[in-house]
Amino acid sequence: MNGKDGKYIPAFSYSSLTPIYDSIMRFAMRESVFKNRLVSQVRLGKDHVVLDLGCGTATLTISVKKTFPEAEAVGVDGDAEILKIAKEKINIALVEITLNRGAVFELPYVAESFDCVLSSLVFHHLTRENKIRSLKEAFRVLKPRGELYVADFGKPQNTLMRLTSSITRWLEENHDNVKGLLPKMFRNVGFDQVEERAKFMTMFGTISLYRAQKPGISLLLHSENGD
């Protein structure tokens, strides 16, 4: 991820923690639970292309590819070291996934390249400005009626999660997430059919699953005509 000064910041803020990233995610974040639910909501068919935005070690990317073997899977992340781990995991999993290095708020892809964009625990790393830039990029690279699926920190659903979130909300850039602002950001960049589909409790706060859709061509033309 990139900090406010533009300098790259690795997962968990310290590169020394990169080798144990998967272990922390597995035990502290209930990763398999919420990522399996996220994948179960995705709709992909033959020849569809899916992008994992900020793919990290490619846990989600691999799961999507195994679930939808006829779809083309692509992962992008700015951390060269974590992409090395991702490549090793992909080789072990015996699946074909394309990995690219790039910033999530400046994607190296042409417009309307993907049928689906996924993101897991990326947006809470980003400043508000870069959250919006990244969502605009996701919108740009999606085809009309393409879908966005996001798993990230959200508004706490009970007293325990409110207490946990009060401790973690100022870590990294999590306060916008905890205030429940992500759905509004989705709508502001042009997505519609925005919905929060599930919530999960973790050691660091509530994880919410969101879905949104890029309007179809006819809807965009309709809007441009001012009707």
Image (spheres, grey):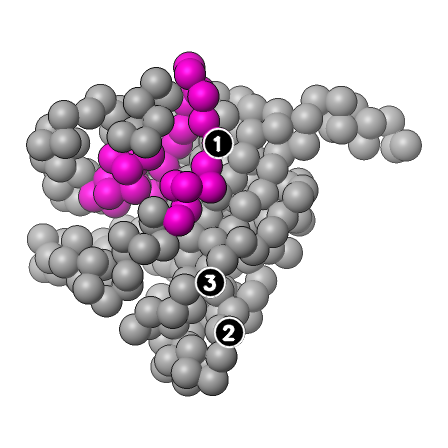
Q: Does the residue at mark 3 contact the one at mark 2 (Cβ under 8 Å)?
A: yes
Label drawn at residue 157: 2
From which residue to which does the magenta span run? 37-64
Circle 1 — which element?
Answer: loop
- Which residue was labeled with disc 1? 43
* Distance (Cα) linking label 1 and label 3: 20 Å
Residue plotted at (36% across, 76% down): 168
Q: Amino acid at mark 2?
A: Gln
Question: Which part of the image, by quadrant, shows the C terminus?
Answer: top right
Gap in angstroms between the C-alphas marked 3 and 2: 8 Å
For label 3, the residue is: 199
Q: What's the residue type where badge 3 is placed? A: Lys
Q: Examine the image and state in which quarter residue 207 appears.
A: bottom left
Q: CA–CA distance between discs 2 and 1?
A: 27 Å
Residue 127 drawn above or below residue 46: below
**Mark nearer the N terminus (2 vs 1):** 1
Residue 160: % across, % down: 41, 83
Q: Residues within 10 Å of mark 2 (few under 14, many from 20)?
A: some
